[in-house]
Image (spheres, rainbow, N blue to C red):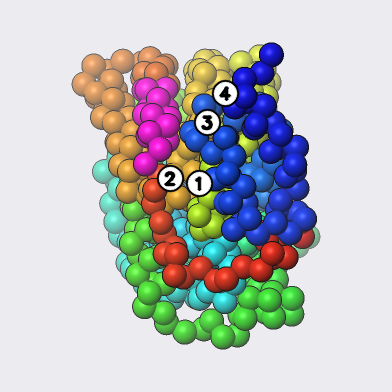
Amino acid sequence: MWSPKVRGCLRISAQHRHYPFLGYSPVRISRVAKESPCSRDHSIMTALIRKPHTPGGFREMFAIAVPMIVSSACETVMTFTDRLFLAHLGPAQMNAASAGGLTAFMFTTFVLGLTGYSTAIVAQYLGAGRKDRCGVAVFQALLLCICAYPFILACRPLGHALFDYAGIVPEQRVPQKQFFDILLFGTIIGLVRNCLSSYFSGIGRTRIVMLSALTAMVVNVVANYILVFGKFGVPALGIRGSAIGTIIGGSCGLLVVAAGYFGKRNRTEFHVLQTFRYDREVMRKLLRFGSPAGWEFFLNLLAFDILILMFHSRGLEAATAVTVVFNWDMVSFVPLMGVNIGVTSLVGRYMGAGDPATAHRAAISGLKLAWSYGLCTLITFSCFPEPLVNVFRPAGDDELFARAAPVAIFMLRLCSLYVLADATNLVFSGALRGAGDTLWAMTISVGLHWFLVAVLATMLRGFNVSVEMAWGALVAVIWVFTALFYMRYRGGKWRNIRLIAPEERAPILPTDGLHETADM
């Protein structure tokens, strides 16, 4: 019934089920992969039905990605709750926090993308058996954050000018600037926290990242409730209280990952105290491979920010509908970033071990996980859009929200059509970045976002179509670019990229291995 090649695949899978958890080294995994008749390129479908307990399989991906999904979900809950609290003060306050917060975040994205690539570098050093280099990569990222912070603060006038140019109505623009200013001053906290979280993602110990996010979420929600509404004797600060509560929550999250990084176990195993030095070679790698990721993140968020502001420029009704939709879109998209990070980490680790076949399996395992989550989101958005929109309905009768709700319901239904496209994009882009193919991933991702800007500007400004019709055009474009990401990954050029040179790999004993995921 089975061909000799398939029987060989099944035989080797049965003989080597537990590589990463029972001490098989990257060298051993690579040798098995090369000897196997499965070592040639696999089709996507073949990889999708592979048993989940092989190296790079679903179980290993699940162990790394799920804590990251929970972490991303916590960030989503923080932002979602902030907008929900402010919605009770009026749609203008909610819209102001959405656009102002996004703009403040946008000015940090280049640094976040650049330093966040330390996840892939740390993972590749771990796969190469060089634990002493993992902390060095993180310290280079921290140096870049410190240097970048003054330049981020200098962007404050630019943010104000962007709000003025967008033509946002004054009742939204004034609180939007207040929210933006406070968050911008607190960006250093998020930058440092991102560096340490990237380190733990790279070594596969993602539970501490999850704990950090949970801590930040709980503190943020409680602090925002007190500061926004003025509880327990604290004066009601409204939107300013929301921004301050966000910074307080982020600070507590930073303390958690800092405690883990300087804890005895990590300090001893990864020689942390010997890593506080400038390293030219590691900095060169971070700048070379991380800069495309940084530019991609920045240019994408700049394009996304412009998209939001263009919708907001159509008036408070359109701004309210779009804010509600993007709050729910964030619920579908941000947790998938956890899968993206998990794919980057595992692909980077196996590429560092010189085993692209197992890296491919890790990517497909991530695709299965992302599609599972995306399918649940698709069903929810398509079947229950009205209750989801009404979550943000202000207390009492609000004429503005009543006019915006039908538009938001229509847009949310369309959101369900591109959820799986988002999931596919994030998985394949994460795999390409983990392997070091960052320039191409940047090119196609940035091209997508700025093409969306051009389409929206043409639809809204050129042809003056409705918000609903413009939204439909954006959804169609996203599916086109999904095909491009798949084609690049399927082409296989990423398999030949070597971020860690063979001479940099440490000799690996038969008892060594990629065991970090077992500790999670």
In the image, which residues are magenta? 477-493
- For label 2, the crowd category at 10 Å Cα-Cα, with few meaning under 14, some 14 to 19 and many 20 or more, is some
Residue 84 in percent (x, y) is at 64, 39
Q: Secondary structure at mark 4?
A: helix
For residue 335, say whether it is visible.
yes
Residue 464 is situated, as x and y percent measured from the top left of the image, at: 27, 18
Type of amino acid under label 3: His
Q: Give 383 or 129, whichever is nearer the viewer.
A: 129
Query: Looking at the rendering, in which quadrant would you find the C terminus?
Result: bottom right
Q: CA distance from mark 3 to mark 4?
A: 8 Å
Give residue 42's mark. Answer: 3
Residue pictured at 40% horizontal, 38% vertical: 492
The local secondary structure at tag 3 comes to loop
x and y percentages locating residue 189 in the rendered image? 54, 67
Residue at horizontal 26 percent and vertical 43 percent from the top:
165
Between discs 3 and 2, the one toward the N terminus: 3
Residue 399 location, quadrant: top right
Relative placement, left or right, of 333 versus 384 is: left
- Mark 1 lies on residue: 356
Q: Amino acid at mark 2?
A: Arg
Q: What residue is at 70 percent from the left and 53 percent from the top?
A: 20
